[in-house]
Image (cartoon, grey):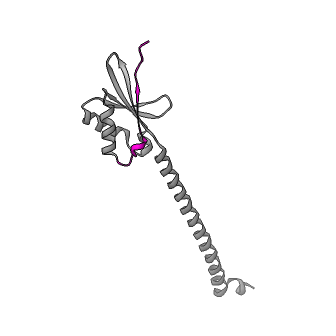
Amino acid sequence: MHQRLYSEEALNANLSALSVDAQKRAEKDAAKKTAKAAAAEQREAERKAEAIVLIKRVERNKRKYVTVVSGLEEHGLDLKKVAKELGKKFATGSSVTKTAAGGEEITVQGDVSDDLYDWLVEKYPEIPEDNLDMKDDTKKKA
């Protein structure tokens, strides 16, 4: 009995059958992981295509303005680096601030919204121009 169960031939036969099943399972798992990764990549591309970058000009005091840019993080940009580049480009102060909704936005001192729009189109071609939106939040006189 022992000879029949644990002989070289019996062990090799059992191991070869086991490895075929394991190979099938491994192939199935690999196919599943590939499909899952492709679906995640497609969702990411759709999310980026729908993400709007909003450029707002906000009145601070009488004739002082700040320009606020939100939605850049959706396109995979590092906000701190972009804020630093904006500060150098427009020779103004710029910073990353947290919003009430929990997101982050870049605040640039001064009314640079038109130039900022052109700069974003030129510097970051991965952001579709259709996804750039400009808004003017000025206080209306009553």
Percent across and percent down for residue 131 are 43, 42
Q: Residue at x 48, y 44 (%)?
A: 50
Q: Is residue 73 left or right of residue 23?
A: left
Percent across and percent down for residue 106 are 37, 33
Q: Give the residues drawn in magenta, as a range.
A: 125-142
Q: Residue at x 41, y 46 (%)?
A: 76
Q: Is residue 142 left or right of residue 36?
A: left
* Residue at far top of view: 142
State the image quarter where residue 119 is shown: top left
State the image quarter where residue 72 is shown: top left
**Does 110 sit above or below residue 27?**
above
**Does 17 sit above or below residue 40?**
below
For the N terminus, the quadrant is bottom right
Q: Residue at x 30, y 44 (%)?
A: 122
Nearer to the camera, 6 or 104: 104
Q: Residue at x 53, y 54 (%)?
A: 40
Q: Is residue 49 left or right of residue 58?
A: right
State the image quarter where residue 89 is shown: top left
Nearer to the camera, 92 or 32: 92
Q: How many marks?
A: 0
Percent across and percent down for residue 79 are 37, 39
Nearer to the camera, 79 or 55: 55
Percent across and percent down for residue 132 are 40, 39
**Does 101 sit above or below residue 35?**
above
For the C terminus, the quadrant is top left
* Residue at far right of view: 1
Residue 138 within the segment the image draws in magenta: yes
**Does 108 sit above or below residue 77?**
above
Residue 133 within the segment the image draws in magenta: yes
Q: Is residue 16 left or right of residue 74?
A: right
